[in-house]
Amino acid sequence: MKGVRHAGLTLDRVCAITVAALITFMIAQAFPVLALETRGLTSHATLFEAVRSLWQGHMHVVSAMVFCTTMLFPGGELVALLYLLLPLRAGRVPRAFDAVLRLVQFVRPWGMTEVFMLGVLITIVKMVSLARVIPGTALFAFGALTLMFCVIAAFDPCMLWEIRDEVMNRAGARVDSTRRRNRQRDNAHGGADSPGPAQPATARVTARHAGLIACHCCGLVQSRSMQASEPHCARCRSPLHERSPESITRTFGLLLAAALLYIPANLLPIMHTSSFGRTEDDTIFAGIAYFWRSGDWPLAVIVFVASVMVPMLKLAILTLQTVTAYRGSDWQPLERAKLYRMVERIGRWSMLDVFVVSLTAALVHFGSFARITAGPGALAFGSVVVLTMLASNEFDPRLIWDTVNRRPARAPART
């Protein structure tokens, strides 16, 4: 009962924060994030206007990236979580529970509200020298939303599978209790009641069994049936694999594509600036140099780390993981596992420059006076970020430990 009470408290807290986050999310979408005022001209930008400006600038893929990572996926996660949490809190399992929870687990890594918030702050610093920057209502909403998403991210969606099992077990226990009371009442009146079929006890899979396998979807550890050609999870019915099929091949292919796109991402202009008939192209390194010359060296360091260092580290670390797994190397498995977890956490922050470009393009549209549009480098750079994140998801980290587990144990030293 202690675990059940703890789960109830967790549901109450997560429900409250999710409701507040959904309200804040709608406010952040409805109001302007920033506004610029210069020479009697005013320009403001909502998040949707930033997406639309990219679409009208024929950057359809980049527009879809920004829309999905800042609007579709975060909003979808909040709505799906509420759909699951509210019925579970009331003691019942909602319809299509499995499909909705899989949706939550799929979209969570792709929601980048906190990265977008940092992009807004960098945009403010960049625009101060051009015009008067007026913070909008959505700016404060996104700040609060970032904190709420940090709390929600600490809640593991896999816990909902366990809570669902508890709710279903409670319902089954209530049905059994009602049947026992009915049988006792019938026996008291002299009625004969044939015993029903015995309810099987819930099978508990323990680590002492051989052939254990963990479900990547719900986290349930279970024994694999050797007779089944395509085993599925006993709880969520997801396909089970001892190792993800063709994990190394798919990871290497995605890494190769990301490495090829990383070169034009740094060489091609990420923004086109048009002012009084003059046109200027800015690359990622040009933006870093601008912040450095302006005295904003902390922002220059942040942009350099997020846009240059992080993609290079991701490519190098994932290449190391792929090569060592392919060769069956047992070199430093613990350190390699830590590096893989680090890549998963920092991968999203490379989208920083894409968000800065989208906001800047939406803000600076003063006709012939000044106008900024996204360049082809934004498309290449956004593609690098998406491809490296997909490569990280495709790599099976269990491959790191395969050779280590096959090594014979050392015999104890004789004294």
Image: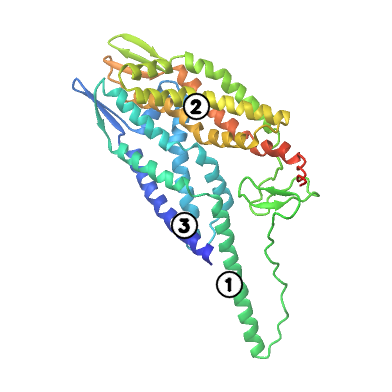
Residue 84 lies left or right of residue 251; in this view the side is: left
Front residue (pair 313, 31): 313
For residue 10, which numbered disc appears in the image? 3
Q: Earlier in the sequence, mark 1 or mark 3?
A: 3
Dot 2 amino acid type: Val
Q: Earlier in the sequence, mark 2 or mark 1?
A: 1
Q: Nearer the viewer, mark 2 or mark 1?
A: 2
The outermost residue toward the left is 40
Query: Residue drawn at (58%, 72%), measured in percent from left and top?
Result: 174
Q: CA distance from mark 2 to mark 1?
A: 54 Å
Residue 18 percent coordinates (x, y):
42, 50
Image vertical order of residue 85 relative to residue 118, above or below: below
Residue 95 percent coordinates (x, y):
55, 55
Neighbour class for label 3 at 10 Å: few (<14), some, many (≥20)?
some
Per the image, the residue denoted by label 1 is 174
Query: Residue drawn at (70%, 33%), measured in percent from left and top?
Result: 330
Q: Earlier in the sequence, mark 2 or mark 3?
A: 3
